[in-house]
Image: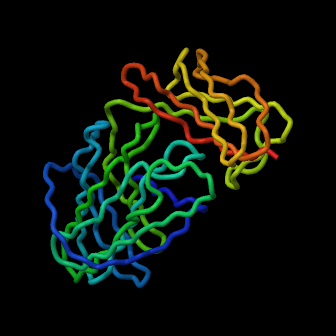
Amino acid sequence: MIAARQIPQHERRRWLWRRGLALSLATGVIVLGSAAVATPDGTPPASVSVAVSPTTLHYPDRRAFTLTITITTIEAQDVVINELSPEWPDRNTAGRVLRLQTPTLQGPGHLGTAQLIADFPINTCFRGPTAGIAGFDVALDAHTTTTVRQTMVAIHRPPWPRADYTPRLSQGAQAPTPIAVPHITMAGKQGVHVQLHANPPLGGSRRRLPRTARAGRDLSIAGRTSPVLVHAQLLVQARPYTRGTKRITTGEVRTDERGRFRTLPWRPGPGDYLVVASYHRPRHGLLPDRSCGLSFDVS
């Protein structure tokens, strides 16, 4: 069984239920596992199994896959299925790797969907959707089997190493039970995950942007790449948010044998800044990519 990932505390749920009925088609599926959970009122659990087709994606030309979720009840009940796309492997990056499309019902029952709308601090780096389908419920009679089909699409951004594309599913509105889902693999070309930090370190909290830097003090931007790129060139740019703020000179940096780099020291004037590193000369099997921005205020 795959443990369901909890929604981060800084995200807020707003459930918007809609009722509908539709049809869709899918073929050639792989089935893995099932889950059953008792409802709070003691109703016997529904049986839920998940199939996926295909289980191997290829960036950028094949990014979609379809879930076929089969539900069987013993007694009449509303079966609640929670869904969540994995996050990016970077705590400074908001957004999800998958875009969940509206599920459709094939068979008896009444289908409702839920949406998740996430709130983030200003200047947060977004990569992919922060809102969308977050699950569904199906109202079923006793001794009924129905099928829900849903397409999920990897966002059109270069995949990062260690990115996980397997959605998290669980059953139940309270104390949800994880549902096993076949593992999704992403093949094809990949991007370059560039992580930035300042030296000396910025003040403030990662969860309370913008970070701060002291005026009149030299600052360097450092970072590393994943996968490790040896002697690769990256373009580092600093963009002022505030009108009238002096633009920082754009420059090239070169990574060392461990994929690390650092700019020469510079002294930014007062104002708000966004620093971005871009990888624009891709090697074999890689795609052009850019880091999430490093935001800070100089005062």
Residue at left offset 64%, top offset 23%: 261
Residue at left offset 56%, top offset 63%: 119
Question: Coloured how?
Answer: rainbow
Numbered disc total: 0
Residue 97 image position (x, y, % from top left):
42, 48
Residue at left offset 40%, top offset 26%: 286
| Residue 17 position (above or below residue 237) | below
Please identify the residue farthest to the front as the structure is shown: 244
Please identify the residue farthest to the right as the structure is shown: 216
| Residue 224 position (above or below residue 171) | above
Residue at left offset 41%, top offset 76%: 16
| Residue 239, quarter of picture | top right
| Residue 262 position (above or below residue 154) | above
Residue 81 image position (x, y, % from top left):
36, 68
Give left or right: position of 19 versus 115. Answer: left
Name the residue nearer the viewer: 86 or 77: 86
Name the residue nearer the viewer: 240 or 229: 240
Residue 60 image position (x, y, % from top left):
31, 37
Give left or right: position of 125 versus 172. Answer: right
